[in-house]
Image (tube, rainbow, N blue to C red):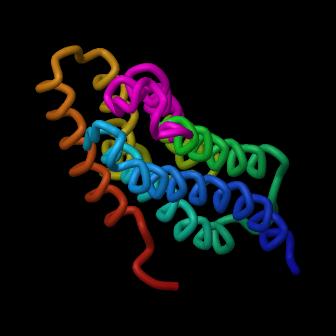
Amino acid sequence: MDSFQWITVTVSIVLGLGITGTLSGMVALFRARGTVRFDWIPVTWAGCIFLWQLQYWWAVIELSGLVHTWTILEFAVLLLLVVLLYVASALVLPAQPTDRDGDMAASFEHDGRWALIFISAYFAVALFANCYLWKSRAFTYAQVLDAALIALPLLYLRTKPRRGRVFVTLLYVAVSLVAAWLNSPKAY
């Protein structure tokens, strides 16, 4: 095994745990469907985090061709990115769907919304890594999309009326789908 394969093992373990957490939260919500007041907003944010977990796992393969010698900083940034995704996935949905009297909206407002800070931090670190570690060109469409993916979760946290939160959530979904499609290698 070369150094990149060893690095991806560590990243894959943490990423796999995060994906397991996201899927487990979804299954727990399904099982508690009779006792939980469903709210689609937290589930939508969880779906977006799941999308980014899969996109990260797919895109990390590309790094084997971009980086020939790995430094501890590059490894730490890769690990930080996956840890941010893990924490976002662990927070977005309740561990016990019956928390907060089975009200998903209340649970998301109390604990789940913290996931949005971590997903914003994920894109801020990704933007740093792309610009400074992997030397991508400045002011590309990918960087503009990353800036939107940093700002939208923070905007959600600042928005109070549900109508505004619905709009921000739907806009985040649209930007996420476009960014994931454009930023993902189509084949290896």
Which quarter of the figure has residue 166?
top left
In the picture, measured across the screen, residue 155 lies left or right of residue 130, that is: left
Which quarter of the figure has residue 107?
top left
Residue 122 x/y as whole percent:
53, 40
The span picked out in magenta is: 93-122
Residue 177 x/y as whole percent:
28, 58
Q: Is residue 134 above or below residue 152?
A: below
In the picture, measured across the screen, residue 25 lies left or right of residue 177, that is: right
Q: Quadrant of the N terminus?
A: bottom right
Point 17% across, 23% down: residue: 162
In the picture, measured across the screen, residue 137 lies left or right of residue 62, that is: left
Q: Is residue 13 above or below residue 164?
A: below
Q: Is residue 145 above or below residue 168?
A: below
Point 57% across, 58% down: residue: 19
Direction left: furthest residue: 163
Which quarter of the figure has residue 129?
top right
User: Depth check: 20 or 74 in front?
Assistant: 20
Residue 128 visible here: no
Point 61% across, 46% down: residue: 86
Point 84% across, 47% down: residue: 72
User: Depth check: 118 or 145 in front?
Assistant: 118
